[in-house]
Amino acid sequence: MKKLNVFFAAILMVLLVSCNEAPADKAADTNMAPVKHGESMEHHASSDSAAKYTPEMVANKRDFICGMPVTAGIADTAHYGGKVYGFCASECKAEFLLNPQSHVTAK
């Protein structure tokens, strides 16, 4: 019985150690280079389960914050005033959401 307890304790330790390992860098796991703000998103992989927006599906032709055309790639979207707006990066979306009305009326 003592050997059985030692065996289960060893398995438990292996499981605990493997669960506490630091996650590997996502870019290294997927062989993707880090995305720089404003770069084209066309060559970057995306999840098949994520909604894919095309330029025809969003109300804006350019990212309100950086001016990048949405035809270069839509990394994030925001819903405002019954419309969907596309952004090249989540940082641009976050900036837009601070005061969306000012960006929409300035368009």
Image (cartoon, rainbow, N blue to C red):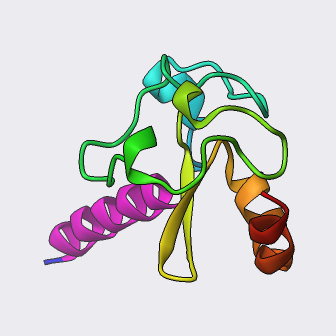
Residue 10: say if magenta: yes
Tell me which residue sits at (48%, 81%) in the image. 82
Q: Answer with the quarter of the image where residue 5 lies.
A: bottom left
- In the current view of this chain or complex, which residue is farthest to the bottom? 81
- For this rendering, which residue is in front, 89 or 45? 89
| Count of marks overlaid on the render | 0
Give 65 or 12, whichever is nearer the viewer.
65
Q: With respect to residue 6, does 46 lie above or below?
A: above
The secondary structure making up most of the magenta span is helix
Q: Position of residue 75 (x, y in %)?
A: 55, 44
* Residue 13, image x, y percentages: 41, 63
For the C terminus, give its image quadrant: bottom right
Viewer-proximal residue, 59 or 70? 59
At horizontal 13% and vertical 78% (from top left) the residue drawn is 1
User: At 48% across and 16% down in the image, what residue appears?
Assistant: 43
Residue 41 shown left or right of residue 89 in the figure? left
Look at the picture and state if 57 lies above or below 77. above
Tell me residue 65's x, y (percent): 83, 50
Q: Is residue 46 left or right of residue 71?
A: left
- Taking the magenta stretch, the answer to whether it contains residue 39 is no
Residue 6, relative to residue 98: is it above or below? above
Q: Residue at x 77, y 30 (%)?
A: 38
The residue segment tinted magenta is 2-20
The image shows residue 91 at horizontal and vertical percentages of 78, 54
Asked where in the image residue 102 lies, by quadrant, the reply is bottom right
